[in-house]
Image (cartoon, coloured by chain):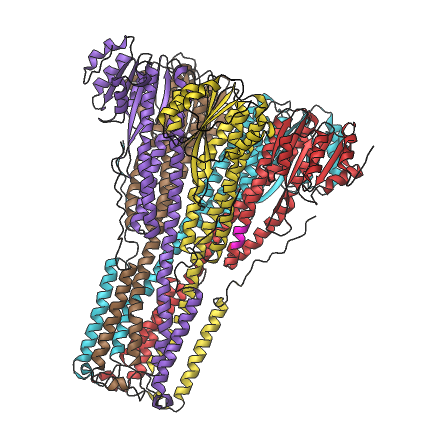
Chain colours: A red, B yellow, C cyan, D purple, E brown
Amino acid sequence: EERDVENSQASSLAEFRDRKSVTWVDVQGLGDVEILKEVGDTFGVHPLALEDVVNIPQRPKAEEYDDSVFVITCMITAPELPEVEVEQISIFVGSNFVVSFQERYGDVLEQVRNRIRQGKGPIRKSGADYLAYALMDAVIDAYYPVLEDLGEYLEELETVVIEHPTPDALQAIYRVRRELLVLRRSIFPQRELLSALIRDENLIFRDSTTPYLRDCYDHCAQVIDVLETYREICGGLMDVYLSGLSNKMNEVMKVLTIIATIFIPLSFLAGIYGMNFEHMPELHYKWSYPLFWVVIFSVAAGMLFFFKKLGWLDREEHPVNISKTSND
Amino acid sequence: EERDVENSQASSLAEFRDRKSVTWVDVQGLGDVEILKEVGDTFGVHPLALEDVVNIPQRPKAEEYDDSVFVITCMITAPELPEVEVEQISIFVGSNFVVSFQERYGDVLEQVRNRIRQGKGPIRKSGADYLAYALMDAVIDAYYPVLEDLGEYLEELETVVIEHPTPDALQAIYRVRRELLVLRRSIFPQRELLSALIRDENLIFRDSTTPYLRDCYDHCAQVIDVLETYREICGGLMDVYLSGLSNKMNEVMKVLTIIATIFIPLSFLAGIYGMNFEHMPELHYKWSYPLFWVVIFSVAAGMLFFFKKLGWLDREEHPVNISKTSND
Amino acid sequence: EERDVENSQASSLAEFRDRKSVTWVDVQGLGDVEILKEVGDTFGVHPLALEDVVNIPQRPKAEEYDDSVFVITCMITAPELPEVEVEQISIFVGSNFVVSFQERYGDVLEQVRNRIRQGKGPIRKSGADYLAYALMDAVIDAYYPVLEDLGEYLEELETVVIEHPTPDALQAIYRVRRELLVLRRSIFPQRELLSALIRDENLIFRDSTTPYLRDCYDHCAQVIDVLETYREICGGLMDVYLSGLSNKMNEVMKVLTIIATIFIPLSFLAGIYGMNFEHMPELHYKWSYPLFWVVIFSVAAGMLFFFKKLGWLDREEHPVNISKTSND
Amino acid sequence: EERDVENSQASSLAEFRDRKSVTWVDVQGLGDVEILKEVGDTFGVHPLALEDVVNIPQRPKAEEYDDSVFVITCMITAPELPEVEVEQISIFVGSNFVVSFQERYGDVLEQVRNRIRQGKGPIRKSGADYLAYALMDAVIDAYYPVLEDLGEYLEELETVVIEHPTPDALQAIYRVRRELLVLRRSIFPQRELLSALIRDENLIFRDSTTPYLRDCYDHCAQVIDVLETYREICGGLMDVYLSGLSNKMNEVMKVLTIIATIFIPLSFLAGIYGMNFEHMPELHYKWSYPLFWVVIFSVAAGMLFFFKKLGWLDREEHPVNISKTSND
Amino acid sequence: EERDVENSQASSLAEFRDRKSVTWVDVQGLGDVEILKEVGDTFGVHPLALEDVVNIPQRPKAEEYDDSVFVITCMITAPELPEVEVEQISIFVGSNFVVSFQERYGDVLEQVRNRIRQGKGPIRKSGADYLAYALMDAVIDAYYPVLEDLGEYLEELETVVIEHPTPDALQAIYRVRRELLVLRRSIFPQRELLSALIRDENLIFRDSTTPYLRDCYDHCAQVIDVLETYREICGGLMDVYLSGLSNKMNEVMKVLTIIATIFIPLSFLAGIYGMNFEHMPELHYKWSYPLFWVVIFSVAAGMLFFFKKLGWLDREEHPVNISKTSND
């Protein structure tokens, strides 16, 4: 027997509690404390757990009570990249029911609902523990598209940072780093809670569900691996950015130095022959002026040759071209 | 039977020791060693523990004695953000009493007193272990408003650092980092002590109190998570600050280079025609002077075009605008 | 009895399942889901495992099922240094068969095939667990040539960075770091899975295979050691690069400062005697002009002497020549 | 019966070995190998342990022998801040004696001697294990004044670094960091050894001494916490120093740029009218010269206005003044 | 019965295998695979172990076989400081023999040979396990002189870096860091292997040898402590070097700025009176020229005063002189 009831009265839930089939009550929005309390009372949610449902944000965790398990997990969405939104989902699992509390309307669990409605996979044949697993799995699977988007964002950022190290790029790196911190803070405790569920024996999560939890744990570990990689990439981008700044400064200083170094001595020479001493024999020779130009050009050419030799006039003249050695 | 006695004589405490109901003795201020000793003797506080009460600051810890548990914890207040004040609270828990010692008058435990006076929650019905938990929980809950204030402070600092990287901002970052170190040093051992209380069996903290201690432990872990995040944010802000400095330097150098690079060659040209050689035919042509201006403007325009091409004349021309790719 | 069948029909595999001898089915390319399913069904691959085969990339791991072990591992190739390609190989080990799934055609297992065909070593005499070990070992051995190439690449990079710190070199460092992250992400979980296989008792991997797995584990640990060393070397190269930039800047600034500091005062002197005041007695003395040149050269020589004393005119005058003290 | 014998002959020690009361032999200075050997033989010190006494410095550790425990610990003094001196104290504890070996004359154990002489506290009533604890405790307590001095030193350094980032300050930071490394290297193994003494059962250290060892362990952990905090503070000071340098550079560059940017164009203008072209009509107008000055001042004022707008003329105009939000 | 046979035939070794006394076979040089195989066969070296002997470098490790233990360790020499050479020594320990394989001729084991020949210490009276310990101990003791030399090298480097931060010094730091990485990679696994030998029960290493192994382990831990300290010192030197560069740049920029800031305005003034306007009344006054010099000197003096006030003319005026506070 299957039923899909929406916006039901909290009072009508009592009848589901004692059925043999599995009941999933999904509460979206935590505004009405009365309803929460009624739902909690109906399914025997521990007062401490109910407090954790309301006082958000809590740290993801799993807590075992006499005949139920209480899990807090974190749902991630990223409507505006790179900003990430975190929503707490509290899941209360009994032997024949699952009660989930969400902060807001809208979630990443649609796929679970579809599988229930269409009866796909083992979800309809399995117990409340499998359903709880399915919810946790959906929550963790929702990290993947966000990570992918962040990965692409980082790749585009990489191009920008390498080619145009502007302050905008710096801020983008900084923002990504901050969001990665948010993601880490939400995913690390979930790994702990999954490992606790797998390790500790309890009455709710049966042995048959353990491989699924292990699978979920592996995904969690993979998400963490990717996050750590992204963090290191951000650190690397920061280094690239900073040395990009130094490089730009070097370029600017080189231009200034080349121009100044060429023209300051020449201006001095011109200044010499602009002096008004009475006895300056050079001023009166016929070839002085053309000779002066010759000197000027010689000095300028000498300077340019000197800078050429210092390698200041070429850009990036030493590409790293390393031939792969054969290895077999 | 409930009593709320203030400023009682230490000598009058003996009668409370042997009652069945739970007694909480709260000693504020450690100045009078005699009183401390009398209170300690009355409730059988171990001499080593009493030494730790007086020799502040001690590292937060939990120690088990024959029929009592001694807990040192750290109370945080932040009257002047971002500076943080730490005060040691030593809690000595017996089977039917709790003795707490505070460094100074004033604390974060008012909420616990209210719950006792109003008889709200399980605090009046539970034993000394629950009361001790309530005190430790109040101490850890007092971290939250401080963390929130620090979070807001960091956010404002972020705006300041990104827009005006002044030395003041640097010092603010440095000060926040130092205070975060103080907070870490006080909260890390509290996690250890809670985990020890949960893990180790002892006669004082009963099984019924364990879920509460676990809850307290979770809050502690969350505080640590937030602190670590703040630390990383501070590190990120430092990077942003330093590259802000480099950017400012780049801007300054660009202005200097543009001005110098345009005018130094022009000045050289003017210097040329300020020379007093007798034989300088250009000086005598009618169109020389206007032509000179034409050359001047051409050179200046050429330079500006060159700088334009180098991208030195625009600011932040490469905003990072990365379209979110759809993922479903 | 030995057989080496290529491109066989999936349907014809059933007969191998029940033989006593060990069968290795190697599926290259994951395009045809039907075949994968048929192979999976034939050898009793758990649906969750089969999902992991197809949904690449998975994190390397070992999972134990009732009468089989499922291992995911990562094959590394580096056709275009420093870029690294990762390919997932999923290995399903039963008591008398090994089924491996590869993402693409082409692999690093040729050496294993040769040993089977030539009957070299214990591979033909041992069970499916030894074969599985041989595959994992070949996968990990394939890291060595890549690491060696990366090591040589880093050495060449070192020369480049020390001698010519160009932006190209920076990007090369950055790219190597990123590839090292990829390698780490693939090898760390393999160490975990090997340690789990060694530690946990299971029906498939027998005690006689344990020394081989330990050997494989040691290689894995060595790969990780080398990777960590490379990472630190990259960090060191980054520092060298950045200080190379600073050094270049210093050189540029020194040239500018020397030229400007010498000629700006001289130009000022020339400017003085280019003034048109009526009453400037110096202008009319006979020795003024030669004397002027004397002054000019004295000032210039004084400046140069000053710079010499500051050590600005020499390069690298303090080589670190530290004599080894004898120690016996 | 109590005796306090100084400079006794090594040979006369044998009589103390077999007494019931506790004997403490304190050997200061390791020059005379014969005496060391004689003392060692008298009290049955293991040859390996005696080697460790002489071959200094050893890593702090605790080793258990059949009927004795051998402890190596590290005494810290800081006569010349921030330099720290480390001296090894080897303590050999039997059931009724303690033999301690010090590198040099002079130590931090005077307080223990006083307590023994005055019979204060439990030291005279307890066994050799308590005495050994008292020595280890005195050694660890001697870290506190050094840490306090270092803390004050760091605070003064902080003021210096923030106000005058000179190379001297950098070297001071560097030296403090090096001394902190020395302190860490000496205190970390002491924590290990204490934790081993507490954890491992042995015949010498009885259960009644365990709370004291735990207390000592807590002090050790606190010393480590403080050291780690100091290290992070040093890292922070380094950052402050480096950005202080950048700030100073920015200030220098701004002055140069402002002066150069204002006067270089003006000099160009003056150069224009210093040219000797025959046909320069402006030279002959009556108002040219005053007008020239007007132009000069307009250009200078424009430049200054421009710099004002860039914020280059003010210092630290954005103090971080963040009002504390109320939180209750 | 004692024999010391050099360059014996591999075939003649069989007779030693079955004796009661301990036999040490030391193979130097791995060129002749036949000999290695013969030696291996004679003493029952496992094929996997023999492979590890030949395929160098292996990671140091200890492996237990049925009646033997196989240890790979790393010998360090530093003929050309700071470069470090690593040589693998594989030690195969049976109940009455030790077979060691070295990569090359020449080693650090001479001291062990001397002790055997001279019969000093317990080495002749103890079993094969003690001999194996003696070899491992000699290998680890050989780290000490290298560390001492590196320590002196670092100290000299420190002086160089603080006084003359040249690129040479940077490369020296970089090279030391790389060699420290090599040392770490070789010593860390040796600690693991020693801890495994101490922890795991095995038939070869008897309880009486355990204190020696623990001693060896302690030395290993000390080597690691020193290496970590050196690494941090290198990091600190890097910081000092980088800020040394910044300081030098600051000095260079200050000189430029002071000279330019003083002379550029003065040159402008000179340029003013070099103009050829007809109507410049100042040119004709008698006191103009002397007055001009007065103005020049006033401006220059004002500038210098301004720079003095900014503190640009003094060097290191704020030495960190912090008086030690008394603490007793």
Q: Position of residue A112 (x, y in %)?
A: 73, 39
Q: Is residue C102 above or below residue A257?
A: above
Q: Quadrant of residue E36?
A: top left
| Magenta span of residues | A171-175
Q: Quadrant of residue C78?
A: top right
Q: Which residue: 37% across, 35% down?
A: E227
Q: Is residue C118 visible?
A: no
> Between E224 and A184, which is closer to the camera in this rendering?
A184
Q: Is residue B306 above or below residue D252?
A: below
Q: Is residue E42 above or below residue E73?
A: above
Queried whether the magenta region covers residue A264, the answer comes back as no
> Between A167 and E185, which is closer to the camera in this rendering?
A167
Q: Position of residue E65 (x, y in %)?
A: 50, 20
Q: Which residue: 73% across, 33% down?
A: C40
Is A179 left, or right, of D125 in this rendering? right
Q: Which residue: 51% across, 30% down?
A: B135
- Quarter of the rendering occupied by the C terminus of chain A: top right
